[in-house]
Amino acid sequence: MKLRTFSIIKPDAVAAGHAGAILSMLEEVGFKILALRMTRLTQSQAEGFYAVHRERPFFPSLVKFMTEGPLIVMALEREDAVAKLREVMGATNPANAAEGTVRKRLAQSIERNCIHGSDAPETAEVELRYFFSTLDLQG
Ligand code: CMP
């Protein structure tokens, strides 16, 4: 069954001109773009999105990074969407990411790692709702 997941092309990748390359990589492995929008996060929006990481030492830096410039939020659809997206993204730390993944090819560091993808179907639904309406998600 086709399922959907949520992804962000992060500010580092947008600023570096990698948005098109990342979209191509996602389409090449069969993702359908259901919804897509360029936006900027306020500090409180970034804090809310990453609330699960609030106690982590990197949280203030992560919020600063995610608010530094425009980013692209996306709803993506595919068989096994959550796991497949995480496979294409590669490991959080690009130093550990497999060859051919987005992060191996394009990311600079464990923080400035180009792309976000939901970690589970339940998380995907919550994250999609953070940015998109039912109408947006019709595809
Ligand atoms: P993401 O998949 O969006 O989920 C949380 C984000 O926090 C992660 O990608 C990175 O951008 C960032 N992050 C995770 N671990 C670290 C770390 N050890 N140091 C700095 N940033 C991190």
Image (cartoon, rainbow, N blue to C red):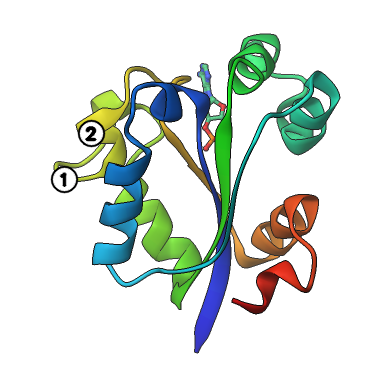
Residue at horizontal 35 percent and vertical 38 percent from the top: 91
Rendering quarter of residue 102: top left
State the residue in front, 133 or 94: 133
**From the viewer's perspective, is 107 left or right of 59?**
left
Q: Is residue 59 above or below residue 52?
A: above
Secondary element at tag 2: helix
Rendering quarter of residue 120: bottom right
Secondary element at tag 1: loop
Q: Which quadrant holds the C terminus?
A: bottom right
Q: Amino acid at mark 1?
A: Gly
Give the residue number, with chain letter if any, for mark 2: 104
Marker disc for residue 100: 1
Residue 25 in the image, given as x and y percentages of width and height: 26, 54
Residue 129 in the image, given as x and y percentages of width and height: 78, 58
The span from disc 2 to disc 1 (Cα, nearest Å) is 6 Å
Residue 8 in the image, given as x and y percentages of width and height: 54, 43
On the question of residue 113 being in view, the answer is no
Point out the residue furthest to the bottom here.
Answer: 1
Whether residues under marks 2 and 1 lie with C-beta atoms below 8 angstroms apart, the answer is yes
Crowd rating for badge 1 (residues with CA inside 10 Å; few <14, some 14–19, many 20+): few
**From the viewer's perspective, is 133 left or right of 6?**
right
Residue 138 in the image, given as x and y percentages of width and height: 66, 78
Q: Is residue 96 above or below residue 59?
A: below
Cβ of mark 2 under 8 Å from ligand 1: the answer is no
Crowd rating for badge 2 (residues with CA inside 10 Å; few <14, some 14–19, many 20+): many
State the residue in front, 60 or 17: 17
On the question of residue 130 being in view, the answer is yes
**From the viewer's perspective, is 30 left or right of 39?**
left
Point out the residue furthest to the left here.
Answer: 99
Residue at horizontal 71 percent and vertical 28 percent from the top: 53
Q: Amino acid at mark 2?
A: Lys
Residue at horizontal 54 percent and vertical 78 percent from the top: 3
